[in-house]
């Protein structure tokens, strides 16, 4: 075997080692990359938080804790109603989870255990419970469910099938919401010896403009309204936005009327209604400042919604 080839075999691994980082160097590089990503995440999150909270001041000491149950209005990335209430000084213990329907909340014992757990946590910490908050119903009126409410274009009826709408809202959703309100009132009696005030809310008018979460691209959630109109052969966004927004007014008005009637039910003397109409704009050229997408307010929009809750909370004794 030639002497030159032998020396080549001996020195080849050394040459490769000099060119390619060893295990220790690779680990150091990976650790540095992890640290850099973590710093970028922290910096971006702080910048986003400070942007959302500009002009606000942290406040603490608001009397009484809050227990919350609901959907994405209480459990949303970056900002939601509960985050705004916490920033204004309320201590909130939440069982809310995005995507839940009112009927799931009302009829699932497994889900209701989360609310019981929240009540027991407040009791165990010997904190006064100021109120219980519920945010639900939007998911029962969006997505495939909205298609059921809309008449097919050309079938001869109005855009909104009022008979179906009445059945869904005035019967099914009202029964579900009353069931939950009675159940959580009973739970509050068991834990605190009294019917704790419960806040429920209606909605302002959304715009079916085809926007989902972060645009709704690929696997991201949404849109939730525009596809239902297209499915029923109506013009979608942008040409059909005005007409479809008008149809959503009818749906929201019916839902708000149902929810606002519950505090006058003799079985529900501890229930309070939070009116949200007039809080978020639906005007062309303005609404995108208040609505992040078809179903969810922007950070500033969530803050204004939270202020409506605070107005009702401040009147409780």
Image (cartoon, rainbow, N blue to C red):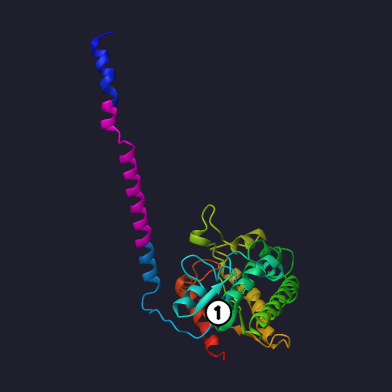
State which quarter of the image contains the N terminus: top left
Judge from the rendering whether residue 117 lies leftward or rightward of residue 292; answer left or right.
right
On the image, the x and y values in percent for residue 305 come to: 51, 78
Q: Can residue 38 be seen in this view?
A: yes
On the image, the x and y values in percent for residue 124 come to: 57, 77
Judge from the rendering whether residue 80 lies leftward or rightward of residue 168; answer left or right.
left
Q: Magenta stretch containing residue 19, yes or no? A: yes
Magenta stretch, residue numbers = 14-43
On the image, the x and y values in percent for residue 312 come to: 55, 86
Q: Which of 119 and 263 is in front in this view?
A: 119
Residue displayed at 30% across by 40% down: 25
State which quarter of the image contains the C terminus: bottom right
Our reading of the magenta stretch's main secondary structure is helix
Judge from the rendering whether residue 86 lies leftward or rightward of residue 117; answer left or right.
left
Q: In this view, does 45 lie above or below 14?
A: below
Q: In this view, does 183 lie above or below 213?
A: below
The answer to which quarter of the image holds residue 266 is bottom right
Q: Magenta stretch containing residue 154, yes or no? A: no
């Amino acid at each position: 075997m030639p002497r030159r080839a032998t020396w080549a075999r001996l020195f080849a691994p050394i040459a490769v080692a000099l060119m390619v980082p060893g295990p220790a160097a690779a680990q150091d590089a990976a650790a540095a990359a992890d640290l850099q990503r973590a710093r970028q995440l922290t910096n971006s999150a702080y910048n986003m938080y400070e942007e959302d909270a500009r002009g606000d001041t942290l406040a603490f000491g608001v009397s009484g804790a809050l227990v919350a149950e609901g959907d994405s209005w209480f459990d949303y990335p970056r900002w939601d109603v509960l985050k705004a209430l916490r920033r204004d000084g309320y201590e909130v213990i939440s069982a809310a989870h995005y995507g839940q329907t009112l009927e799931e909340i009302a009829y699932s014992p497994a889900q209701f255990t989360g609310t019981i757990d929240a009540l027991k946590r407040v009791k165990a910490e010997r904190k006064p419970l100021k109120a219980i908050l519920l945010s639900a119903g939007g998911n029962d009126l969006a997505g495939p469910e909205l298609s059921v409410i809309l008449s097919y274009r050309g079938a001869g009826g109005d855009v909104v099938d009022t008979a179906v709408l009445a059945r869904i809202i005035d019967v099914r959703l009202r029964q579900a919401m009353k069931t939950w309100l009675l159940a959580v009132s009973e739970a509050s009696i068991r834990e605190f010896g009294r019917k704790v005030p419960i806040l429920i809310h209606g909605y302002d008018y959304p715009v079916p403009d085809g926007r989902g979460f972060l645009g709704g691209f690929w696997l991201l959630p949404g849109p939730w309204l525009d596809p239902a109109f297209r499915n029923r052969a109506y013009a979608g966004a942008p040409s059909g936005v005005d007409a479809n927004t008008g149809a959503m007014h009818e749906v929201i008005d019916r839902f708000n009327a149902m929810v606002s009637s519950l505090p006058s039910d003799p079985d529900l003397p501890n229930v309070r209604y939070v009116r949200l109409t007039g809080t978020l704009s639906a005007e062309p050229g303005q609404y995108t400042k208040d609505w992040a997408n078809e179903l969810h307010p922007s950070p500033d929009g969530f803050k204004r919604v939270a202020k409506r809750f605070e107005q009702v909370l401040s009147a409780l004794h």
